[in-house]
Structure formats: structure tokens, C-alpha cells
Image (cartoon, grey):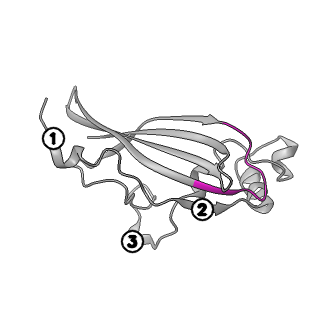
Amino acid sequence: MSGLLSKALLANIGKQAPPRTEVVTRRDIRKYAIATGQRDPSFLAGDRAPPLYHVALFWDVVPLEELTPDGVSIDKLLPKFPLERAMAGGLNIEYHRDIVPGDVLIANRTLTDIYEKQGRQGPLIFYEIIMEVSTEDGEKVLTEKTTRILR
């Protein structure tokens, strides 16, 4: 192992981003359903959101110069890592109930793990973020675990 993970870097485990609140609208559900080629009439009518609707819902809207090379905003929850080339490592979503128009959703994101492994071409850093989305009344909507790999 190359020992890329310092105690200071590992001290970021457990760090939480400020909660994000977004209002779900029928129009936004319909636009997402059409853009993603959905066929279910309840999605197209905007009665309930298709899977993955939530993914971009909580992204920051930022100027172009604040985007990473892959087109997403810089994640302020993350520390500066010694490796920077990011790859998808996995996405696991557990849905607790449908997202429907009028929902006021609150997303809470936590950096839950940072670890290192040795790859064929050198060291890899993995990090995991859990996002829990609930209604303003505290009803669980979904839990998302994202794993990213840095090389």
C-alpha cells in the first residue's frame, strides 16, 4: 500500500454537507419523464417521479468555471485528495416511497468512508457518500450510497 491517506484526510469521514431542500413539481417530473423516454403514463402525467429523478434535483447550479471536467459542480463535501482522476465505483439506491408533486424533499449527505486499495496500475482511493432523502415531515423517501474511485 502506498499510504496516500493521512490521518487528516481520514478525519473527514463523518463530515456532513448542509441539508438541501427542493420542491418537487408536476411540471419538472413531466419534463424529466419525457427527457428520459419514460412510457409509464403516471410518470408522463407527472403523478409520480421515475427512478433516478432525484439524482440531479439536489445538484448545485453554478457558473461553468465551477464545473469539473465531467460537467458536475465541485463537491464541497469532499476534502482535497492526493489522486484526482475520478471513476464511478457504484450506486445503490433504496426507495422507501414514490416521489410525488408537492413533496418538499430534504437531502442530507454524509461522507461515510475513505479507503485505499492497490490496483494493477497503482494505488486507488475509494470514498463513499450516503444521501438520505426525506420529506419535510421526516418521512424517508430514499437512501442512496455512491462509491467513487480516484486514481
For label 2, the residue is: 21
At label 1, which amino acid type do we have? Leu
At label 2, which amino acid type do we have? Thr
Q: Residue at x 44, y 71 (%)?
A: 64
Image position, residue 8 (x, y; %) = 18, 49
Kind of element beneath mark 1: loop
Using residue 71 as the reference point, say whether residue 4 is left or right of it. left
Whether the residues at callouts 3 and 2 have beta carbons within 8 Å, the answer is no
Q: Which of marks 3 and 2 is nearer the N terminus?
A: 2
Query: Mark number for residue 4?
Result: 1
Using residue 107 as the reference point, say whether residue 67 is left or right of it. left
Query: Mark number for residue 94?
Result: none
Q: How far apart are marks 2 and 1 (CA)?
A: 35 Å
Q: So how many labels did they put on this image? A: 3
Magenta residues, as a range? Answer: 96-106
At label 3, which amino acid type do we have? Glu
Location of residue 137 with respect to 125 vertically, above or below: below
Query: Mark number for residue 65?
Result: 3
Q: Earlier in the sequence, mark 2 or mark 1?
A: 1
Q: Quadrant of residue 13?
A: top left
Q: Verify whether residue 97 appears in magenta.
A: yes
Q: Is the magenta stretch mostly helix, strand or loop?
A: loop
Kind of element beneath mark 2: strand
Q: Verify whether residue 50 appears in magenta.
A: no
Q: Which residue is drawn at 16% across and 44% down?
A: 7
Give neighbour class at mark 1: few <14, some 14-19, many 20+ (Cα, 10 Å). Answer: some
